[in-house]
Amino acid sequence: MVSDEGRRAELAANLQRVRDRIARACAAAGRRPDAVTLTAVTKTYPASDVLLLAGLGVTDVGENKDQDAAGKAAEVRAAGVRLRWHFVGQLQRNKTKSVSAYADVVESVDSLRLVTALDRAAVAVRDRPLDVLVQVSLDGDPHRGGVAGDDLWRVSDAVASSDGLRLGGLMAVAPLGEDPGRAFARLAELAGQLVATHPGATVLSAGMSGDLEAAVQHGATHVRIGTSLLGMRNSLR
């Protein structure tokens, strides 16, 4: 069993490697390194890892299952640590009230029904708007979430006109088996169109452990890193 100090050293080394990759990608794209935020995707990992990452300077963490995230967020808060929590998984409408209570950002909004449910929940449990990213489908696979075509603009407009939500921008996952650079280039075009009609929606969450460089090249403001940061450990389940 790895000690806390051993785990901290492991995470510190991984974090430095990820930060170096982001810095090199930003340099290659002619962007400042601080233009890209690292979101540590801590799904299946314990709150102790989240606290260690916070101690190493990580400010943003991502979770994809409410049943894990709610308790973990509460444990981290109880330790006196304030982080920015991103919900990045597919969100069921019956979980919107729970997620709205601890998440700062929901990155996976992809339907008008979800907008309605999340807006109602956010108004009920929050004292400020909940930031929302609309998830773009780059491959049309319904099992991976996301919205495409005119539905993208309908969902975005619905978020922007809601009372309890704030439209932050877009999120996407690169399609399986496709060059991520081509996929993220399409995403960048959509992001430009969104900002033209919603100037405040400047967040672009794209890129994971295997393709962060391509995402940064095409304007990602946030990259979601799990494996390269936390390593291959046994799931909590």
Image (cartoon, rainbow, N blue to C red):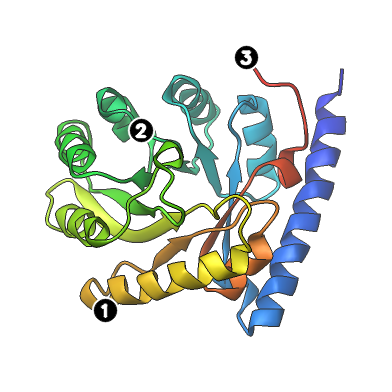
Q: Earlier in the sequence, mark 2 or mark 1?
A: 2
Residue 30 falls in which quadrant of the image?
Answer: bottom right
State if disc 1 and disc 3 touch (CB < 8 Å).
no
* Quarter that holds the N terminus: top right
Give the percent coordinates (x, y) of residue 143: 44, 36
Q: Tell me the SS state at disc 2.
A: loop
- Foreground residue among 27 and 78: 27
Q: Residues within 10 Å of mark 2 (few under 14, many from 20)?
A: many
Asked if residue 202 is positioned above or below residue 71 in the image, the reply reads below
Give the percent coordinates (x, y) of residue 25: 70, 72
Q: Residues within 10 Å of mark 3 (few under 14, many from 20)?
A: few
Q: Residues within 10 Å of mark 1 (few under 14, many from 20)?
A: few
* Residue holding disc 1: 196
Q: Earlier in the sequence, mark 2 or mark 3?
A: 2
Q: Earlier in the sequence, mark 3 or mark 1?
A: 1
* Quarter that holds the C terminus: top right
Give the percent coordinates (x, y) of residue 4: 80, 27
* Residue holding disc 3: 237
Q: Residue at x 79, y 56 (%)?
A: 16
State if disc 3 and disc 2 touch (CB < 8 Å).
no
Cα distance between the residues tagged 2 and 1: 28 Å
Cα distance between the residues tagged 3 and 1: 44 Å
Give the percent coordinates (x, y) of residue 59: 56, 49
* Residue holding disc 2: 91
**Horizontal relation, residue 93 to residue 223: left or right:** left
Which amino acid, by three-letter code, is at mark 2?
Leu
Cα distance between the residues tagged 2 and 3: 19 Å
Residue 46 falls in which quadrant of the image?
Answer: top right
Q: Is residue 87 visible?
A: no
Asked if residue 176 is positioned above or below residue 167 in the image, the reply reads above
State if disc 1 and disc 2 touch (CB < 8 Å).
no
